[in-house]
Amino acid sequence: MADSERTMETGDLGENALVAAEYVSLRSEIVKLIELQAQLVSLTVISLGAVLGVAVQVSNASLAFVYPVLALILGIAWLNHAHAIHRCARYLSQDFEPRWGDGVLGWERFVRRNPLRFGMLGYWGIRLVFMGSSLVATMIGWSMIEADVLQLTIGVISTLVAVGTFLLFVIWRESSPQDLLAEEIESRSTNIPAARDGLELDES
């Protein structure tokens, strides 16, 4: 075997190893981010029960009004992970798998083309943990509030934070399963005419 052929084979093996390593790394990053999201959701639920439990027990409206701030911070972290996951998945489905998959790698494209049944319930349901808990804490706080200027001020601020959390999850959100499906359908429909044009050019 010639040295040039050996060099080419070695180069191909090295390139394949790098491609496999990148794919594994990105999939591992997605899994890790999903695990972090699950931890944030658990922390939010536990914090809601702990804060509101103590607030109701001691009848302290100010303590209940503190929770929406915590929910906002945890919600921002959760959304940041969601966008990071979406970025990795988009790269794998739109760039990596079509370029390197060679018909073998296709999970991310399959996910986009086959969303879970009633997937929108899960999509918004998980967000309601942050949005809904803030609103619940605010309502409980207002139910226990006293005619005190400081508490009224804290209550107004807490209400604005709760509304801001709600708007944040509505405005700053990654694509839903239905959005991804529509995007995939549009992408396939635009690629089909391009492929047909290429065939006509070859025939001519």
Image (cartoon, grey):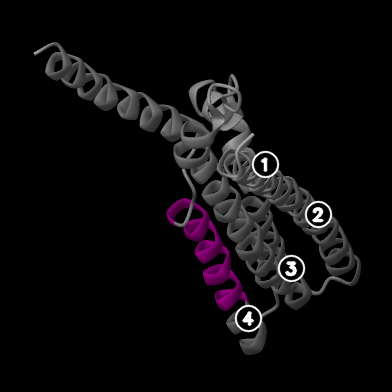
Q: Amino acid at mark 4?
A: Ile
Question: Mark 2 belongs to which amino acid?
Answer: Gln
Q: Quadrant of residue 73?
A: bottom right
Residue at 46% across, 57% down: 172
Closer to the chain start, of discs 4 and 1, is: 1
Q: Amino acid at mark 3?
A: Met
Q: Residues within 10 Å of mark 2 (few under 14, many from 20)?
A: few
Looking at the rendered structure, the secondary structure element under dot 4 is helix
125, 163: nearer the viewer:
125
Quote the CA–CA distance across marks 3 and 1.
Answer: 58 Å
Nearer-the-camera pick, 55 or 202 = 202
Residue ID at (50%, 60%): 168
* Secondary structure mostly seen in the magenta stretch: helix
Q: Nearer the viewer, mark 3 or mark 4?
A: 4
Q: Secondary structure at mark 3?
A: helix
Question: What's drawn in magenta, residue-wise?
Answer: 155-171
Indicate the secondary structure of the residue bearing disc 1: helix
First in sequence, mark 3 or 1: give its number. 1
**Residue lying furthest bottom:** 150
Q: CA distance from mark 4 to mark 1?
A: 53 Å
Marks 2/4: CA–CA distance: 29 Å
- In the picture of the structure, the residue carrying the numbered disc 4 is 154
Task: Give the percent coordinates (x, y) of residue 53.
Answer: 88, 61
Q: Is residue 123 magenta?
A: no
Q: Which residue is mark 3?
A: 144
Residue 125 falls in image quadrant: top right
Q: Nearer the viewer, mark 2 or mark 3?
A: 2
Cβ atoms at labels 2 and 3 below 8 Å apart: no
What residue did someone put label 2 on?
39
Q: Residue furthest front?
A: 2
